[in-house]
Amino acid sequence: MKQTAPIIHSNHLLKSHHCGELRKTHAGKEVLLCGWVNKYRDLGGLHFLDLRDKYGMIQLGFEKYPGNAENDLKGINLESVVQVKGVVNERPSSAVNKDMATGEVEVQVSEFQVLSHSEIVPFLPQGKIDATEDLKLRYRYLDLRSTRLQSFVMLRSQLMRKVRETLYAEEFTEVETPILYKTTPEGARDYIVPSRVHPGKVYALPQSPQTLKQLLMIGSTDRYFQICKCFRDEDLRADRQPEFTQIDIEVSYVTAEYMRTLATKIVKACFPVGDNFMIPTMSYDQALRDYGSDKPDVRYGLVHKIVTDLFAKSEFKAFSSVVSSGGMIKALFVSKSMGEFARKAIDAFTDVVKPHGGKGVAWFKVEGGNISGGISKFITDDVLKNLKALESEDGMWLFVADSSHNVAHSSTDALRRHIASELKLADPNDYKFLWVNDFPLFEYDEEEGRLYARHHPFTSPRKDQMAQFLKGNAQEAKDLYAEAYDLVCNGYEIAGGSLRIYDTNVQSQMFKYLGMSEEEVTRQFGFFIEALKYGTPPHGGIAFGFDRLNMLVGKTDNIRDVIAFPKTNSATDLMADSPSVPNPDQLDELKMKFEK
């Protein structure tokens, strides 16, 4: 087939229609189409080709093709890019394909040419056999041709537009802040960028625009937002990437209630929740008590029970020793109506809690007033009576005991999520949102004997505890709460924010609690501390994890699905082979060398 110049339509494109938009209403129309060859069939002289673009697929017929179809189509590999001209025809009823949106029509080709030949591809984007995850990441541009990933690309664009429209309607100003910035401690390691013109000095990629957006409030930009890239050099998970996108918001003269109302408007714009949608609130202490997590999935039950006191005099040493050490025993009850586990599955519960510090899971079953299995011989009538007062149905009791309250909470949380997954207790089509507030202001590290900011060092203590905060008593500071609020959905934290410190004395005291010297504060935050002196309005903000929001709306549990070019769990880009070794000349210019 002779290569000719592509046909240009009157719309100044090489096509008049998308492949996926053709219907019976287009019958009789001449169309110009471009796309990838998805499938070719030779049915004894009758030639058919499925042409695909991002909008769908159309069948091409060659019955009226003036050239030699067999010669022109032979040797064209799948995924080659072609242009065709032809007339839309209705298919006979016997040939209608109900599995294709365009299955009632086909295009009878009058002109056909290959725009770009494809070599044999490593895998077919629309093939029935799924490629491995690594192979798809290596050839991400091929995987992006799949209907599934294109739907995520379009969803992300739509959600970005809805967020912007919501915030513009609330009179927000979109402001871009620097990517090359200053290294500041925000809970994770920075990615640093060496400076050629300032040898020995580095920029840092921002973990968030936290100080910058607060400076915008000082600079009179009273309603700011930005959909921005952030960077954190931390261990990765299925819902975390080294670079991520957040919807960053800051407001002057604001209350926490205003921020919650604004966030609710964003949720209503993005999720199918209805006009009367309201988000309930739960305290951090209650979330930890009932779910062992500050981001609980409340689509199903399995509420934790703290039963430490019930086993104070137990003959089961694993429990009584935990009680005497000041530890905690948490219980879960799995009713028979929820489902049952075989002994092998119960024994595997230990592997669920071990990564969280748990030593094991104790259990016994209740059926028809009788108990059996596990630790049933240690369950006294009095203990059983108290447990039945909590749950009267037949089923299985599970227990996690540990001298560390944190381990007891996190292990029981992991067990709860595992059971819900195994028994399919969560409705995948349901969204359960929750505000979690009254967070501790600090976390205390027992080993280091020091305080860390629970959120970040610019979060305000609760107003009713400000006097206690300013006293500077580190022991009492462990019991202080923050003016902070997290938005949780289906077990994911999708947004977090707080009211900020806007008084220099309060900010100085915060840095003292965190063990930072004046020299260290000046070096890292001198510009910010000085700015606070020149009239700072009360302000607060929130940031949505935009990638996680996309995950939830798109109903996927893998964050890589909703990012066009993601990294692996080891923070590598298999497609571009990055990170890569720098050129020696680059290192010389930067006055750097790597140690092996």
Image (cartoon, rainbow, N blue to C red):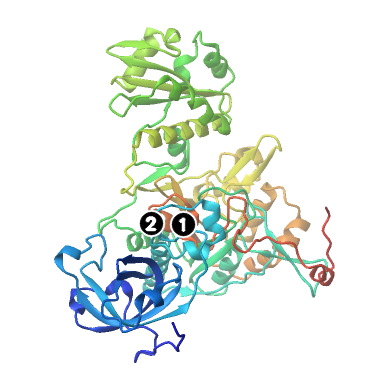
Total labels: the figure holds 2
Where does residue 115 sit, x and y in percent of width and height?
Answer: 46, 80
> CA separation, marks 1 and 2?
9 Å
Residue drawn at point x = 56 percent, y = 39 percent: 479
Which image quadrant is residue 63 in? bottom left
Where does residue 448 sit, x and y in percent of width and height?
Answer: 71, 38
Q: Is residue 496 left or right of residue 278?
A: right
Q: Is residue 343 above or below residue 9?
A: above
Foreground: 410 or 577? Answer: 577
- Which residue does the numbered mark 2 point to in the structure image? 554
Which image quadrant is residue 527 in? bottom right
- Which residue does the numbered mark 1 point to in the structure image? 561
Residue extending furthest bottom?
10
Q: Is residue 152 above or below residue 113?
A: above
Nearer mark to the viewer, of 1 and 2: 1
Q: Is residue 521 left or right of residue 242?
A: right
Q: Is residue 73 above or below residue 578?
A: below
Which quarter of the image is occupied by the N terminus? bottom left
Where does residue 65 sit, x and y in percent of width and height?
Answer: 30, 81
Where does residue 156 sit, x and y in percent of width and height?
Answer: 42, 65
Q: Secondary structure at mark 2?
A: helix
